[in-house]
Image (cartoon, rainbow, N blue to C red):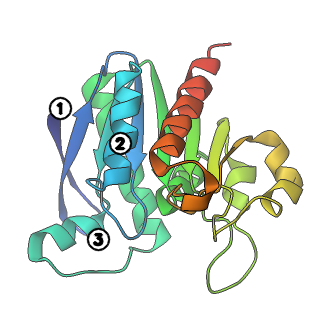
Amino acid sequence: MSYFLVKACLEAQELLQSECVIEGDVNGTIVIFTHGAGANMQSDFMVEMTKGLSNAGFGVVRFNFPYMRANAIDGKRRPPDRAPKLIKDFNLHIEAIKAEYSPKRIILMGKSMGGRMAAIVAGDTDVDGVICLGYPFIPLKGGEPRLDPIENSQAPICVIQGERDKFGGRGLVDTWPVMNKVSLHWLTDGDHSFAPRKSSGTTQEANLATAITHCTDFIRGLDA
């Protein structure tokens, strides 16, 4: 494991200092892995997925979005930044990682909100693929499903979803025509974090291992 510090001046002359965690081989494919709304890059979910993909031979870079970086400084809990700020921050990290490592391929991967931002960024940024882990299709407060990022992505997309995900479970997501362009995989009885019920006969660890296999197959399949 190593660290990479991104420094850049934003339009408002705010100095951004973002510590990225890098694992695996950065000489080939780099997966830029972003967190969800409520847990940062050091969550168990993020760490386990990173370990699996780095063991499969990929470089994985994690970073915290601005509100999580601020939380780490003063210990206060903040809501996520607005999408435009998240997208700008995401693009800044992509540019910095490209300049630092010159990877052969870049894959954007995100948990929940991070996956949605990855799909949005892929609408007008040159990347090789997108992986969404627990995509937040349905806003919890109601509203139309968030399908535009998937529809508008210029890169191939893989969505890995728990069958019981409250943001979009099996039986609903399968009915949307836009999903025909997506490599969609369901995890047995999984919730938004891929955790199943005890009665299901499987475990969260097994679902995470399956998710890692789907991610690996998707990335390697881009060469086909």
Residue depicted at 70% across the width and 65% down the height: 168
Label pair 2/1, CB-CB below 8 angstroms: no
Q: Residue furthest bottom?
A: 141
- Identify whether 17 is placed above or below 95: below
Q: Which is more N-terminal, label 1 or label 2? A: 1
Q: Amino acid at mark 2?
A: Glu
Residue depicted at 62% across the width and 46% down the height: 160
Q: Residues within 10 Å of mark 3 (few under 14, many from 20)?
A: some
Query: The C terminus is located in which quarter?
Result: top right
Residue 173 in view of the camera: yes
Q: CA distance from mark 2 to mark 3?
A: 23 Å
Name the residue beneath numbered marker 3.
Answer: 67
Name the residue beneath numbered marker 2.
Answer: 48
Give the foreground label among 2 and 3.
2
Q: CA distance from mark 3 to mark 1?
A: 24 Å
Query: The N terminus is located in which quarter?
Result: top left
Question: Could you tell whether 195 is left or right of 39 in the image?
Answer: right
Which one is nearer the viewer's eye here, 207 or 154? 207
Question: Could you tell whether 68 is left or right of 216 in the image?
Answer: left
Which one is nearer the viewer's eye here, 64 or 126? 64
Q: Which is more N-terminal, label 1 or label 3? A: 1
Which one is nearer the viewer's eye here, 47 or 37? 47
- Identify whether 129 is placed above or below 82: above
Name the residue beneath numbered marker 1.
Answer: 1
Q: What is the secondary structure assignment of the residue under circle 2?
A: helix
Q: Residues within 10 Å of mark 1 (few under 14, many from 20)?
A: few
Residue depicted at 47% across the width and 67% down the height: 84
In x, y percent, where is residue 164?
A: 66, 63
